[in-house]
Image: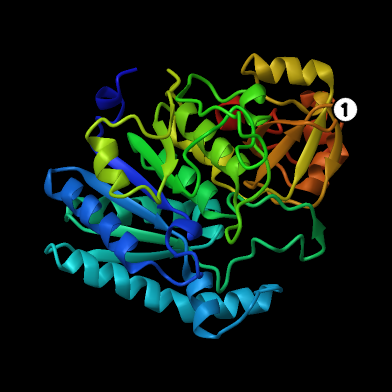
Amino acid sequence: MDRLEFVKAKRIVVKLGTNVLRNDEGYVSLPRIYSFIEDMATLVMSGKEVILITSGAVGLGKKRLNLQDTQGTALKQACAAIGQGKLMSIYEGGFETYGLVAAQILLTEDDFSVRERYLSLRTTLNKLLELGAIPVINQNDTVSTRDVTLRDGIEDMQVCFSDNDKLSALVASELDADLLIILSDIAGLYSDNPKTNKDAKLIKCVEKVDDSILALASGTSSGGRGGMETKLKAARQVTRFGGKVLIANGKEPYVIRRIFEGEDLGTMFLPENRSMSDKRRWIGYATNIIGKIVVNNGAKKALLAEKSLLPIGVIDVINTFKKGDVISILDEDKNEFARGIVNYDSNSCKKVIGHHSDNIAEILGFKNYDAIITRDNITLL
């Protein structure tokens, strides 16, 4: 695909990683940040919509406190609280130079997972873009639960995002962005780890993010929480919904401007020709998951054929959940392959395991639905 055609976009999400926001000494690189601001301001003034996902609050707080490391959740959260104000002041001042307004939005997992809050967030972001403002989004590290592995006695909770790569994918896919640009300290996706293999080649274009592409990821970035694996998963999510993704080196001078001039930078990820309703996207990718249901092979086959999940196909119920929760659907090998909004709570589900739908009323004393999860409320992963 031609580069100029690839970057032709109306709504653009730009994600800036921690390592591109600071210099070699670990301090914030103001010249680089202001070059990003100038390039994004140029895009907005040309009629495009720009949403910025930015890291950097923890790193700025760490430097302000003269800390060598930020081990421990409480210390990271304290650094985020100190650094976030400084980070936002840089963006506000920079965009104001061009007569543009920056709007701070700090998000936690529940802002997506709770549907009412998610819908409110979508409305707010769309209104900000309509007003010509630039939403500046960061994970609310001060109160985020991303490091929690045990909450309220529930093990293995899956959160909808745990770093800004995943957050950028959520924002891009749920707001129907045309293009997600992820700027890191690496030029793109390589055939091997370029830090250990000098013969590794930059891959210019990826048609589909499959298992062979994911296998090329190696390690995490220094200073950030993500790595190439999280970026590839973000690309897979966005391209699945018809968006385009570009991963490029944010330390290249005026990289954003050069991207939109059609320069051959980074790795392009081409969109898939798929359509999915907003509700199904939210079910599959924007919710926190606690409850799980294990189904037999017959039920899995039916679900893959877009049928409802009936109690006769359920073989196990894991963790506690309420009616209306989004839960994970696992096959007999405990591999997740779908998610859905459940019609009964976990106690009721356990009672009707393996039974026909006709017996639900007799077993429970009531009957809301024939199916534990109806097909319209299931998203295949």
Quarter of the rendering containing residue 2: top left
* Label 1 sits on residue: 354
Q: Is residue 97 above or below residue 167?
A: below
Q: Is residue 33 above or below residue 308?
A: below
In percent of width and height, residue 132 lies at 17, 54
Question: In the rendered image, is residue 251 in sight?
Answer: yes
47 lies left or right of 191? left
Q: Residue at x 77, y 66 (%)?
A: 152
Query: Which amino acid is tagged 1?
Result: Gly
Secondary element type, mark 1: loop
3 lies left or right of 173? left
Image quadrant in which the N terminus is located: top left
Q: Nearer the viewer, residue 55 or 328?
A: 55
- Tally the marks: 1
Q: Residue at x 24, y 56 (%)?
A: 128
168 lies left or right of 315? left
